[in-house]
Amino acid sequence: MAASATKQSLLMLASLLVLIGVATGSFYDSFDITWGAGRANIFESGQLLTCTLDKISGSGFQSKKEYLFGKIDMKIKLVAGNSAGTVTAYYLSSKGEKWDEIDFEFLGNVTGQPYVLHTNVFTGGIGNREMQFYLWFDPTADFHTYTVLWNPLNIIFLVDGIPIRVFKNNEANGVAYPKNQPMKIYSSLWEADDWATQGGKVKIDWTNAPFSASYKSFNDVDCCSRTSIWDWVTCNANSNSWMWTTLNANQLGQLKWVQDDYMIYNYCTDFKRFPQGLPTECNHN
Ligand SMILES: *[C@@H]1O[C@H](CO)[C@@H](O)[C@H](O)[C@H]1NC(C)=O
């Protein structure tokens, strides 16, 4: 009698653990849908999220947690076909007038023409640090991993594990660095045909609506975060190595490959835009 009761409670405990295991990494647990009146949805027991855009509205979501450093992965599959005029934004941002922000934005295009991956970094409310890339694959054909590795030394943008951009901590040279303001993750699919595609020349073709972008395999295991503004930020990293990661020699080679072959805009080489001199960090790479 006692033995079977113990067995039963062990079984219950085991199934409880399985439930918890399944729930980890679920979009239900990690995100709130914040925009779009039903146009963003979670499927597959929390493992898949989609945002859609139609003529009336786009849609979006945000993380429940706030992060202060972390290595955050998301797999995204972008709007396929004629996606001209659509923008899928995926970014981290803090709040307030002097906010910090780390941006991935995917600018759609007409069928067969390349997406542009637009990146930016804001510190203390000031951005103007755009770098843009083509991708070495079709980002609409399948899911690809977009990673922000943000630690006290640098912010590394990675695509499928390949670094495409690094924003170093240049506080020693007087450049503000995001390190005090926790950020949430935000993503949205919206219309920006006044500027997004070929400089605004190509408009959205609404006959293709609703447009849809999908998300899966969110991973924030390595991070420092809090669940409410009343809490302290705590680090739940298994190992703290990511906290002090910078690019190794192999990754520096990959970065060079991407920047040589796929970068289409770099504010650090835009002398016309900065006639008084390039931003300080451009001279301290
Ligand atoms: C769209 O395709 C055109 C032509 O290939 C290209 O110049 C442009 O950079 C692409 N992306 C966007 C967002 O306009």
Image (cartoon, rainbow, N blue to C red):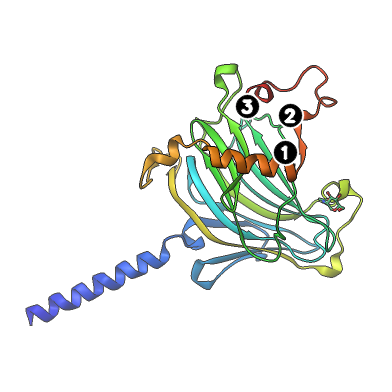
Location of residue 54 in the rendering, given as x and y in whole percent from the top left corner: 77, 64
Left or right: where 66 falls relative to 211? left
Marks 1 and 2 sit apart, C-alpha to C-alpha, by 8 Å
Residue at image mark 3: 285
Percent coordinates x, y for residue 44 in the rendering: 53, 72
* Picture quarter with the N terminus: bottom left
- Above or below residue 140? Residue 167 is above
First of labels 1, 3 by sequence position: 1
Precedes in sequence: disc 1 or disc 2: 1
Taking the image as shown, residue 123 lies to the left or right of residue 153, namely right
Residue positioned 16% across, 77% down in the render: 7
- SS for callout 3: loop
Quadrant of the rendered structure where residue 232 is?
top left
Q: Amino acid at mark 2?
A: Cys
Q: Which residue is mark 1?
A: 131
The answer to whether the residues at label 2 and label 3 have Cβ atoms under 8 Å apart is yes
Of residues 31 and 47, the one nearer the viewer is 47
Between the residue at mark 2 and the residue at mark 3, the CA separation in whole angstroms equals 10 Å
- The answer to whether the residue bearing label 3 lies less than 8 angstroms from the nearest atom of ligand 1 is no
Residue 231 seen in the current view: no
Q: Are marks 1 and 2 in contact (CB under 8 Å)?
A: yes
Viewport quadrant of the C terminus: top right
Judging depth in this view, the residue of 207 and 227 nearest the camera is 207
The residue drawn where x is 54% and y is 37% is: 249
User: Which secondary structure, mark 1?
Assistant: strand
Q: Position of residue 269 (x, y in %)?
A: 77, 29
> 182 or 221, which is in the foreground?
221
Q: Name the residue at the right extreme.
A: 201
278 relative to 244, above or below: above
Mark identifier at residue 268:
2
Q: Nearer the viewer, mark 1 or mark 3?
A: 3
